[in-house]
């Protein structure tokens, strides 16, 4: 019973965090990100495109029948969150977590072939980071995202929140 309650709360927190971060990404205007010429602009913009700047979003397996881009975006985000919720092994890392709410920030790329790569996690312990990376790497391949009619690497960020 307690585990089901923890799972429900964890699911709600992960989904809320996902919605907040996916809807509030801001562009960095610092000088270090400014591009010097058109050729470099093409390389930078198609190397890793933020999720919110895509023309077509990556499509998770169970979202393939949807045709509206916003529905696809929401379905994919929800499916990624559900995958993390169902596969994150809280029991195996609970001894490394803090009492109360724990937050893990994960960043990864959905590459041009739809596979997950370059997973980076920030967490209070190495064990929590490893579990987050393991779960994200287990996400099944998707239909890749597109920008200007070309398949692109897509940056994706996801907070994982759970309560001990």
Image (spheres, rainbow, N blue to C red):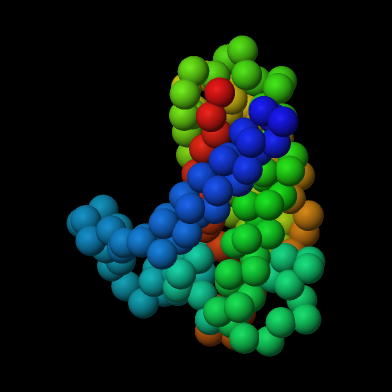
Residue at position x 70%, y 36% in the image = 4
Residue at position x 45%, y 73% in the image = 53
Q: Nearer the viewer, residue 148 or 137?
A: 137
Q: In the image, 109: left or right of 45?
A: right
Q: Is residue 111 visible?
A: no
Q: Nearer the viewer, residue 138 or 14?
A: 14
Quadrant location of the C terminus in the rendered image: top right
Q: Is residue 75 visible?
A: yes
Quadrant location of the N terminus in the rendered image: top right
Residue 104: percent from left, percent from top: 50, 34
Q: Determine whether 14 is above or below 29 in the image.
A: above
Residue 22: percent from left, percent from top: 45, 61
Q: Locate residue 97: give its quadrant.
A: top right
Q: Locate residue 69: give its quadrant.
A: bottom right
Residue at position x 31%, y 63% in the image = 27
Residue 131: percent from left, percent from top: 66, 29
Residue at position x 48%, y 53% in the image = 16
For this orientation, the residue located farthest to the top is 95
Q: Nearer the viewer, residue 52 or 84?
A: 84
Q: Determine whether 48 is above or below 9 in the image.
A: below
Residue 57: percent from left, percent from top: 60, 73
């Amino acid at each position: 019973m307690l585990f089901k309650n923890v799972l429900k709360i964890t699911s709600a927190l992960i989904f809320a965090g996902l919605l907040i971060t996916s809807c509030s990404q801001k562009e960095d205007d610092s000088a270090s990100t400014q591009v010097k010429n058109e050729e470099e602009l093409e390389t930078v913009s198609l190397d890793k495109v933020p999720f919110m700047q895509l023309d077509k979003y990556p499509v998770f397996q169970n979202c393939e029948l949807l045709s509206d881009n916003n529905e696809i975006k929401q379905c994919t985000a929800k499916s990624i969150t559900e995958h993390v919720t169902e596969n994150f092994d809280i029991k195996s890392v609970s001894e490394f977590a803090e009492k109360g709410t724990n937050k893990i920030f994960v960043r990864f790329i959905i590459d041009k072939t739809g596979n997950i790569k370059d997973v980076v996690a920030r967490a209070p312990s190495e064990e929590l980071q490893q579990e987050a990376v393991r779960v994200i790497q287990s996400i099944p391949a998707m239909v890749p995202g597109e920008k200007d009619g070309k398949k692109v690497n897509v940056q994706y960020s996801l907070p994982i929140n759970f309560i001990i």
